[in-house]
Amino acid sequence: MKLRAPAKVNLSLRILGPRPDGFHDLESLMTPISLADEIEVETGIGQGVSVHCDDATIPQDASNLAAVAARQFHAHTGRRFVARIDIRKRIPSGAGLGGGSSDAAAVLVALDAIFETNLGVMGLEKIAASIGSDVPFFIRRVPAWARGRGERIEPVALPGTLTLALFKPPFGVSTPWAYKNLSASSELPGVDYAAQNWNGIEFVNDLERPAFEKYALLPVMKAWLRGQPECRAALMSGSGSTMFAVCEHRDAARGLVARASEYFGTTMWTSVCEAPV
Ligand code: C5P
């Protein structure tokens, strides 16, 4: 079975505070975007999971979230199977785009269909939450508010289609590191973290504070993007390191990507996407 596993961006991400379980309560407006990995899941009789990925930098052992998903499906349903999972990676990792989480959700959806377990959205979201905080969002793959530690999903209609230009510098940000350093972080002088409003959406990300302190290029990118004529809003997605700019149409986003590549150099990964998909 073949599936597309879309990336996400956080249009807004507010961290409400730490929880006794070591996670943080949050409130985030998330949307799937047209950038996607391609996942193929094949099953047979027996037991065991193997993951193969065309990107050698991605772990292909039991720690890969796609493999974790297959094991959690077995744990929750009792179904025994051999699974071979092939991932064509298009979503950069360590990027705040949810690539690993989306792959995991796609594996759950595929196994539910293959074994006709009819777990439904709620059942799948429950298994998804045992894999990672971002995984439940990718079961429905629609724009949604995520609350709790990210597992409470409330679909919402966006005011319209967004065209996004994505920019990822040649380093990633560790999500546990960003959350751990949030409370001790402070705002850098001269950097604008304030909410930006465009087309009925409020764009803001509380994790910019720790990320910008450690990775000095990120606030420079944000200020540069916000100064460009095509840009309606610019901020970091999730715990970074991807920065995205909201544009009004594809040509504007393409122009912005071309200028950014000239200014920041070609080691910067870029993509033009639509949201939602
Ligand atoms: O759930 P996930 O494995 O994606 O989370 C990675 C890490 O990010 C957690 O171990 C935790 O340190 C942090 N986190 C958090 N609060 C959240 C989500 C993630 O503190 N709501």
Image (cartoon, rainbow, N blue to C red):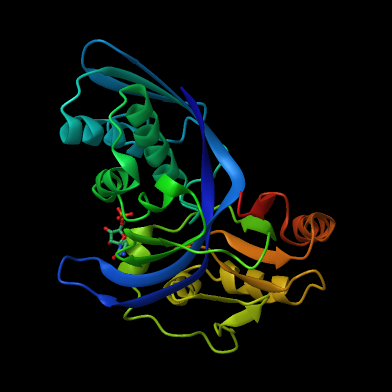
The structure residue drawn at horizontal position 69% and vertical position 66%, both measured from the top left corner, is 246
Work out which residue is located at the far bottom of the displayed protein and give it: 189
Inspect this view and state whether residue 248 appears. yes
View quadrant of ligand 1: bottom left
The structure residue drawn at horizontal position 37% and vertical position 39%, both measured from the top left corner, is 104
The structure residue drawn at horizontal position 27% and vertical position 31%, both measured from the top left corner, is 62
Pick whichever, 241 or 165, lies toward us. 165
Image height of 108 relative to 40, above or below: below
Inspect this view and state whether residue 268 appears. no
Lateral position of residue 190 relative to residue 133, left or right: right
Q: Position of residue 134 (x, y in %)?
A: 37, 54
Q: Where is residue 229 in the image (x, y as percent from the top left)?
A: 82, 73
Q: Where is residue 31 in the image (x, y as percent from the top left)?
A: 53, 58
- Name the quadrant containing residue 84: top left
Image height of 15 relative to 56, above or below: below
- Name the quadrant containing residue 197: bottom right
Pick whichever, 95 or 151, lies toward us. 151
Work out which residue is located at the far top of the displayed protein and give it: 45
Lateral position of residue 216 relative to residue 84, left or right: right
The structure residue drawn at horizontal position 28% and vertical position 70%, both measured from the top left corner, is 24
Q: Where is residue 135 in the image (x, y as percent from the top left)?
A: 36, 49
Pick whichever, 200 or 94, lies toward us. 200
